[in-house]
Amino acid sequence: MTAGILMQLAQTLLAILLAPLLMGWTNQCRAWFQGRSAPPLTQPYRMIRKLFHKDAVIAHDASPLFRFAPYMVFACMALAAGIVPIVANDLPFSPAADAIALVGVFATARVFLALAAMDIGTSFGTLGARREMLVSFLAEPALLMVFFTTSFIAQSTQLPVIVETLAHKQFAIYPSLAFAAVAFWMVSTAENARIPVDNPTTHLELTMIHEAMILEYSARHLALIEWAVALKLFTYSALGIALFIPWGIAPAGNYGALPLAMLALVGKMAAGGLLLAFLEAISAKLRLFRVPEYLSTAFLLAVLGTLTHFLLEV
Amino acid sequence: MEIYWLLGIPFAGGIFLALWGSRGFAPEINALFSLLTFLAAVWLTVRVVSGGPILTANEWFFIDPFNVFLVALTAFVAFTTALFSRPYMRIEQEHGRLNTARLRLYHSSYQIFISAMLLALTTNNMGILWVSMEAATLATVLLVSLYRTPAALEAAWKYFILCGVGIAQALFGTILLYFAAEKVLGSGGVALLWTHLNEVKDQLEPRVLQLAFVFMLVGYGTKVGLAPLHNWLPDAHAEGPTPISAVLSGLLLNVALYAVMRSKVLVDGALGTDMAGNLMMGFGLLSVVMAAFLIKRQTDVKRMFAYSSIEHMGLVTFAFGMGGALANFAGLLHMTMHSLTKSAIFFAVGHATQSAGTQLMSGIRGLIKTCPTIGWGLMLGTVAILGVPPFGVFASEFLIITTAMHEHPWATPFLLTALGVAFASIFGKVQPMVFGETELARLPHQPALTPVFVHLGLVLMLGLFIPPYLAAWYRQAAQLLGG
Amino acid sequence: MTLPIHLQIVNLLAALLLLISFAMLSQRRIIGLVTLFAWQGLALAVSTALVGWATGQHHLYYSAGITLILKVIVMPWIFYALVKKLDVDRDVEPMINIPTTMLIGIALVIFAFNLALPISQLAGTVTRSTLGIAMACVLLAFLMMITRSKAIPQVIGFLAMENGLFFAATSATYGMPLVVELGVALDVLVGVFVLGIFFFQIRETFDSLDLKHMEKLRER
């Protein structure tokens, strides 16, 4: 039990530490695909360090909520990272928070960020917050449907049980997972503010969503938010891995499998980052009014996944 | 043996005319091939009538009194239509509506179309039945668009897409049928042979067959022109060349209904209920009523008679839906009468529109003065199709309605109202076309009106007196349909 | 889930077919539609061949071969050529907006699954559960035909419908007898040629492949 708790803590810590690396890797890959000279892999770490050393500037009108939000967002992301099986399946706290609670944790972070963005009263912050809420309003049901599909297969909403069913029982192809995977990918791009829903690198007022919300932040607050963003991407990647390609995650109690699990994690993350960067490089950002269409497609695919499960796999 | 002649002659004709169809003698060749086909059909008919059903060529073909009657009818009307199309298409060419390349297409497709229909009628395989129905559609798509006018293209597109979608439903029905049959007969070719299916029909899974029949009825029903799937029919009839309207109306609709009937026999056996019959009655009645009220609003003479075809096919479907010896007999009789009369009408209408230069009824006036034979042909044909005694249509309609009164009294008012409305509107519109005032010139070619009067003569004869061997034949066929 | 692995792959391909059907519904460009159609044909051919291999029904290899040649190579090629020649590849808004179309699509899928459920329980074939998917593909293709006003998407919808039917035949019954399948394939091929001719006729007459021009003939 103590070993389990230690395992869970270590895993969370691992996620927090590795998250900027994944971000750096994705940015590097994207630079390659776009034919630019790539920033070093450790660029996100450097940026976070730099931001922590600066003095924070805060608007006069800001309420305590504004200062509090970055900590809250970061805490939520760290919590989320703790729930997802990343290298090992041994998570004693997992009965306390299942996949549905995970969606709730993400939502809490989003609500705080949106409130903080509106707190200042600048037009950009409000605009970003509104758009963010629109996107999440459409993305969350789709994410829930994806979880439902996998939960139906595993007969449980707990992520370790799902991973256990998919990775360590008799191998089977689940067609419904194909639908769920596509839907999950689409939702992830929306939730992580990536192309085609949002572009993480622009500050173009007509199109930005996420960047508009954090315009007023600086120094340590900004550092926390950037870190939380990286952590969110990492958590989503880990989630995708856990649900759709879980092979390699160490089963509960088997510590000998950990090095291999670590290796598998690095490999899958690297491949995932590469794929994300590639898809971002070849696709264009959608007009904002096409985003609902994109996300409703994701939702429908997830629904189809559930339906297919009942038709083909029961 | 004769079956090969029957199918081979029109097919060979199609190929021959595809190669030499643009020559001046093509219309005569077309008629010649049709005559030979008709002779082969007569030969086959004689064989079947004297010797009973034939199952031949490795069980590939099955001819019983039911389909041999349709084979004879098809070959006969195809022959007379070929005779009619000879001067008709020449006149069209002189009017500059067609060139020789299109005539070649026309003649070749005509023969292929006849061949496909005969294959559909004679095959024993429900799958091949589907294939040949689709082939018949494809052969006529380019014929409907022959004039290349915007309206003709639109009609052909509608025809292709609606019938294509419809027939895809029928394919699904066929797949379901095979699926059910495979359980009983084992997989392989046997499970789609109608004769085998017919033997084991009471063992077929009712639930699957029920669904299969719904799909087949919708699918083939689209081609029969049953409401509400009839949209393609008036357009295709109105915009295509008149000989094609005649064969579409007089033959293709029958063949499609034949396909429905073949499946109905199986479904009735499997289900032991009236489900199939009730569905057919519903569709049939709806078609009759809907068509009758739409006839009233038509301004184009070919469209009007196309709607009349929907009405009559609805009536036949209704009759077959009621089932029983008498209703089936009446249905078969009405099918014959309608084919003969309606093709005769289209022949007359074709020449009438040529002489008037328009298909609008308001533009056709006083046929009796410009061309008395056309005028009389149209008038008599109209009177016949409206069910005026002593023509044969009267006899068959009378039989259908009295049977309906007896077995399904609720349907009678609908039928009578629809027939009354159709009567009033068609007669009211044709009368001025024939007897009105005009100053139009006569036609340059001698129109081929022999087919019109031959058909009408037959209809008249059958109305007054059905020869005993013909009646016996009908009765046999009616019995095959589950009388 | 105790099916052998190749049949699981068939199931996966079935799901893929459905996925492609949905992708077609949401596709705006004609070229994209043609590509999707080719992929659908490929999934169909592979699954047919797999079913044939798994069950020892060797005639399915022929059907798979026909599918591969006709629907993955010949027809997409014809369509590419047509689209290029007629110069019609542009973004086209369907008559009903895409999310609504997709919602209707989901409803159709549920309907199809329910319709197929009792039948697939009767089926003795190992691939029976895919019957519902086949039916859903047919209905989705039908939906696509209804919501598109251009000639080529309508025809692709028609062919996709035929794909669905073909898949139904394979999954429920291990394919129809070979003669019938050959006949169906021939009909489809002739149909596509006839349509090719037809497209040129339409184009010549209307100077466009938009069927909105074809609204003169109404029930009057």
Image (spheres, helix red, strand yellow):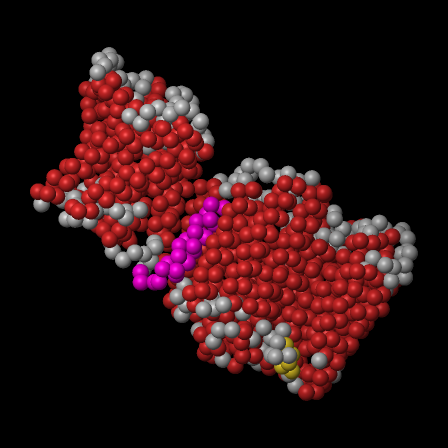
User: Horizontally, is B362 left or right of C134 in the view?
Assistant: right
Q: Is residue C65 above or below residue A59?
A: below
Report whether A113 appears left or right of A187.
Answer: left
Work out whether residue C6 can be spotted.
yes
Q: Quadrant of the N terminus of chain B?
A: bottom right
Residue lying at the far bottom in this picture: please name it. B51
**Residue B180 as seen in the image, left or right of residue B52:** left
Tell me what residue is drawn at x 41 percent, y 63 percent. C127
Position of residue B380 relative to residue C134, above or below, is below
Task: Compare residues A261 and B99 and report the one nearer the observer.
Answer: A261
Left or right, C87 with reference to B174: right
Q: Residue A284: give x, y in percent of width and height.
A: 46, 31
The answer to which image quadrant residue B287 occupies is: bottom right
Residue for point 35% across, 45% down: A181
Residue at 70% across, 59% down:
B140
Q: Position of residue B92 (x, y in %)?
A: 83, 54
Q: Locate residue B85, reporting x and y percent.
A: 81, 62
For the stretch drawn in magenta, what is the main secondary structure? helix
Depicted A185 relative to depicted B93: above or below: above
Quadrant where the C terminus of chain B lies? bottom right
Magenta extent: C1-24
Residue B137 location, x and y as percent? 66, 60
Query: What is the quadrant of residue A140 in the picture?
Result: top left
**Residue C5, magenta (yes or no):** yes
Q: Would you say residue A129 is visible in this rendering?
A: no
Q: Is residue B460 or residue B124 the one in the foreground? A: B124
Which quarter of the picture shows residue B463? bottom right
